[in-house]
Image (cartoon, helix red, strand yellow):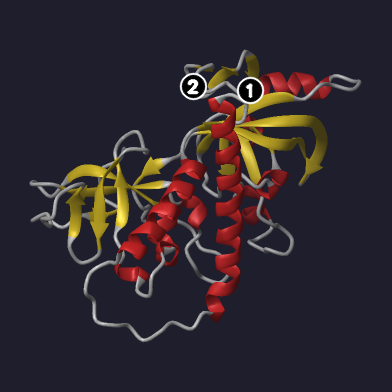
Amino acid sequence: MSDRESQEAVETRLRSLLAGELQRAEREYPNITFRKPQDRAGLSVVTFATLAACLVAALVLLRPSSGVPGAADAIVVGPDGLPSSIGGETVLRRPEMEIRAAQTGEQAPFLAGGYLVLDTVCASVTEGSADVCPESWILADELNASPDQSIDVAEASQLKSFVRTSGAPTVFRVTSLDVTSRHGVRRITAVVEALVWRRPTVGTMPDYVGQTKTGTVNEAFVPDFISVVGGPSGNSIVGYAPKLLLLHPRLLGGSRPQEAPVPVYGPDLTTQVGVLMPGSGFIPLGSSLVSSAPASVGASLQP
């Protein structure tokens, strides 16, 4: 077995592990009884070890990835920011899928690319009834595309490697295309079997990120990585912090996860450049000094 195959096997297991652990944490969190906080005397080696394990799994899940064996160096990106081919296999866009949907007879699986977006049109049509209009996802030609410039991929959220972030450039392996009608409008639904590639989204915490029916923040509208601002001027982007850890600090482990440092990564979203320490701000990697200008999440600067 080659080194690349071994790495991909490990990454597949890590993605599955993180997805399962996150689902378990979300189920059990309401019933967790927290211990009385102890005096803070710094983070232990065990805490850092736990943090490192979580970070490795989270980064593997969120970083740009390809599900095609041996294709990491064979991704050709088109002018729209999406792969035009992966491992020599063409990645179709919506217009090509429209043509395939009109054809008869059995067709072989293929790769389909677009921007994975949480569908909000259905909710507005049905006056926001979650029972009538369950959450669904579409693969659009571009962000803010009109409904006729997208196809439905409602089953995508059932995939183990699915990341619930709206707006990420994504490539799926599609097994078939179904023509349906939704609210009297002809729609094409892609039946997907695997998430082959995605590029994490980077940005700031939106002023309005949507709310669920329980009034909580709809995390789908929060980018995968949030801009962290700090540095000498206090308004420079110094890196990016994973939203998974910012919105769910319990994943950092320890008895006081709210006080645990959150890792901050560079533009490649892989190289750690520092940590975001609650109450202190951004601390560069390898430095024991707290920055004079505390960092903030959700700066006005756009990536």
Lower position in the chain sequence, tag 1 or tag 2: 2
User: Is residue 42 toward the left or the right of residue 36 in the image?
Assistant: left
| Residue 170 shows up from this direction | no
Label 1 crowding class (10 Å Cα cut-off): few <14, some 14-19, many 20+? many
Residue at x-position 50% and y-position 35%: 143
User: Is residue 82 toward the left or the right of residue 298 in the image?
Assistant: right
Label 2 crowding class (10 Å Cα cut-off): few <14, some 14-19, many 20+? few
Q: Which mark is residue 80?
A: 2
User: Is residue 210 toward the left or the right of residue 202 in the image?
Assistant: right
Q: Give the amino acid at mark 1.
A: Arg
- Residue with the mark numbered 1: 93
User: Is residue 172 toward the left or the right of residue 208 in the image?
Assistant: right
Foreground residue, 54 or 148?
A: 54
| Residue 294 shows up from this direction | yes
Measured in 3D between alpha carbons, the distance from the residue under mark 1 to the one under mark 2, in whole angstroms, is 10 Å
Disc 1 to disc 2: CB gap under 8 Å: yes
Q: Give the amino acid at mark 2.
A: Asp
